[in-house]
Amino acid sequence: MTTFIFDVLKDLKNNHTNFSRITFILPSKRAGIFLKHQLASVINETIFSPSVISIEEFIEALSQLKSMSNTELLFEFYSSYSQIVNEKDKDTFESFSKWAQILLQDFNEIDRYLIPQEHIFNYLSAIEDLKHWSLEEPKTDFVKKYLAFWNKLYNYYEHFTKHLKDKHIGYQGLIYREATKKIDSYIKNNADKQHVFLGFNALNTSEETIIQKLLENNLANIYWDIDAVFMENKNHDAALFTRQHKNNWEFFKKNPFKWITEHYSEAKNIAIYGVPKNIGQAKYIGSLLSKLQKEKQTLQNTAVVLGDENLLIPVLNSLPEGIKALNVTMGFPLKSIPLASLFDALFHLHKNATNRFYYKDVIRIISHQFVRPLLHINHVDYASKLNNAIEGDNLVYLNIEELNLLVDKPNDIIELLFSNWNQSVEEALNNCLKLITQIKKVLDKDKTEHILSLEYLFRFNELFNELVLLNSRHEHIKDVSTLYSVYKELLSSETLDFQGEPLQGLQIMGMLESRVLDFETVIISSVNEGILPSGKSQNSFIPFDVKIENSLPAYKEKDAVYTYHFYRLLQRAKQVFIVYNTEADVLTGGEKSRFITQLELEGIHKINHQIITPQVPVIENRDNIVRKTPELIKALKEVAQNGLSPSSLTNYIRNPIDFYYQKILKIREYNEVEETVAANTLGTVVHNTLEDFYKPLIGEFLTVNHIEQLRPNIEGRVTYHFQKEYKKGDITRGKNLIVFEIAKRYVTNFLDLEIKALKEGNTIKIKAIEADNKVQVNIPELDFPVVLRGKVDRVDEYNGVIRIIDYKTGNVQQNQVEIVDWGAITTDYKKYSKSFQILSYAYMMQASNSLNFPIEAGIISFKNLSSGFLKFSKKESAFSRSKNTLIAPDTLLAFESELKKLILEICDPNIDFIEKDV
């Protein structure tokens, strides 16, 4: 395969061109590397190397203005804007940057296409005036400001461009406009210089003007790379611009048009693969490369062109082993580097000037992979210490003093991360640079292991130094929030370059980087609508119809640019693999690109189109089963001898695997910070408050006076127990204040219920409060003792009947403490778990204290206090209205029988722990 660059060089040689006196001008710097490489295969004598530059470099030299980054331009624009706008009407830099970015793009377009500036800005102002409120009187301040903005656009442009030219700097459009003005003097001063333009397609008006003037003065040659198939089809957008140049340029009326080739019609193997999801595409590209590697033994002259550059990392991770030469032309985005997340977290924490920090933000920072080693001092892991202290004390918001107290003493790293960020922007930037230095000191201890991390640090050090320089020059950044916006803008355009051999092995590149280059084998990814082509997008102050009227490029022209690049990749290739995403996506829609449909409808090539279904292994949905080994049985014996609680038994009924995790493996639930008071915390507070109230009354008959004396203490005891259980959590505001009031209301309502019962003539004697019980269950089938233990909230004597009471702060209904079938009490958790618990308490109390029958056991539900004491009852059938609420010896015997069956099942070595669907 001969490349376009080789053909151009061959043609120049055949025309006896003196290469030493040529300036080659290409669309990109990358193409220049390939041109210099191929020059050696065309020229067989020693010469001075020709000048090889990109079009941007040529235009910049011509204009004598230096180009700047978008961020620097934004700062210069604000300096200019501040000089012509009244202080009271001036936007902050942060607000200004939101609309100035769009306006800079419009300035760029207007200048590149040499549109008369005053005309178009006055035209835009007139449109807005007419379209909105010109007839409305009187105009509001908002309307006046809106129209004033449009009226000032030309003033902004004029002052800003003068400001830049005085400094000999400019944005791309201004550089192009100035270069166009200076082309005549350039031609006059370089009459013996030859220029060769090659591989261009869509040219702006400035480029067209400059190239045509050089052609007319015999100072240039231009080579186009377009195929006859596209040129002859007037509807084919791949040749949209080339046809215009051929038909409209005066030069081509007298001179030949180079070149219209016929490579596209040559035989090609084109395969199109629809693959679900982006990761699926990356994996499939990896399998294609593996297959090619086996067939060719090398991936030389093979390119992977990424339509969506976000696929870079997945594709790199999917490359087959054994690739000896690889070149990645695009950089790795700095915003995707782990270190970026650290500074993002720090700016997020400090962008609002506050001395109190949300605990999740603090944990996110101290747990970061680059910070954690800094907090490991003298064999003490202060990051873990802080984390545990925050969770232990339930700290939702912290200040710098509390953070230092939690690590016992002031810590330089803690100060660096959390202190002095909002004193000034300079201090914030200084903190960032100091942090980078501290991280470097740790990483320098083992440079070979951390070589990549040190490269990350170096690039971030450069970025923050650039921010320091911008801030010192312009002083537009007034707070951390604005600094964060500028940081993100800079970060989004920064990349970490890969090292590789640009002329050997597999090439991975973006679509625009493939300009002028040719490969035998091409794999193109993400050929979907919204990506290739990118489709409609209107990020401009200039309306569509005004763009058309002024010959500015709209979405059709932008789509045509992608059409050219796509088809040019196919022109000389022999093997083409096109991959697209078959899955619907919120943003791109998942529709295959029109390019694929166009290829199929052309009928020029035979196309193999397949939808790839990933071979996903079928994973059987197996139950989680834990076999009862001798070691596990031994552990079970220990648990049984130490004591099984009613809650642990109901936990087994609910799901045996949960019982195994909690009782055997001792795995506890993760102790998270409670931002809002949890239900179990509320329950504990109410239980403990009632314990405080009633414990002094054990053995006494309650009176109305007893209860009335408890009322003044409600707030104090509830507050005390919240502080004890909720630690340093704030209960003075928001949902927590509501929960605090609910706790007080629960206690108040309970006391009201007691007073009502007493006033109705009932007698209540307190027998026990929070009574600990521990009884042995005799099971002859087991060779070890089994202990049942638990704590009963309250035992009282109500009108001569013993009541065993369990408090529940949740909502419990009467039907949840009723039972029909004894066999179901140890199998149906949802229906009978409450009955099982209260019967367990009754069983333990009877076994330990020999309570006199009859006994009642039940629940007082604080969410259902109107129902009073919900008594356990045994019904003859589900439809029976009659029920027995008294617990007699035969009731406990029936329960004991089911309890023993359950314990036997738990301890049976032949019955495994099997997970249930909960």
Image (cartoon, rainbow, N blue to C red):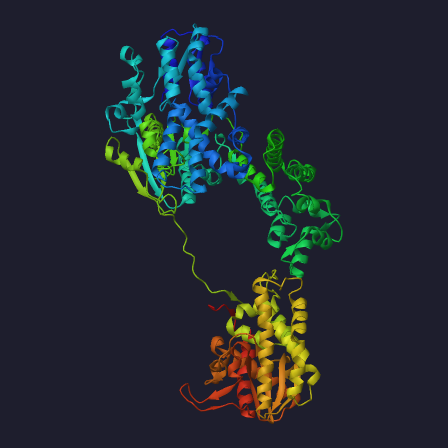
Between residue 752 and residue 163, name the one nearer to us: 163
What residue is rendered at 57% in x and 87% in y?
756
Q: Is residue 508 left or right of residue 353?
A: left
Measured along the vertical axis of the image, is residue 289 above or below residue 16? below
Q: Is residue 724 left or right of residue 70?
A: right
In x, y percent, where is residue 781? 58, 82
Measured along the vertical axis of the image, is residue 415 above or below residue 426? below
Query: Seen from this angle, which residue lies furthest front?
Result: 138
What residue is rendered at 27% in x and 12% in y?
253
In x, y percent, where is residue 495? 53, 33
Quadrant housing residue 651: bottom right
What residue is rendered at 47% in x and 65% in y?
623
Between residue 513 and residue 427, name the one nearer to us: 427
In x, y percent, where is residue 265? 27, 26
In x, y percent, where is residue 251? 31, 12
What residue is rendered at 58% in x and 38% in y?
483
Is residue 194 in view from this perspective? yes
The quadrant of the rendering that contains the N terminus is: top left
Between residue 542 and residue 532, name the one nearer to us: 542
Is residue 533 in view from this perspective? no
Picture mark count:
0
Quadrant housing residue 856: bottom right
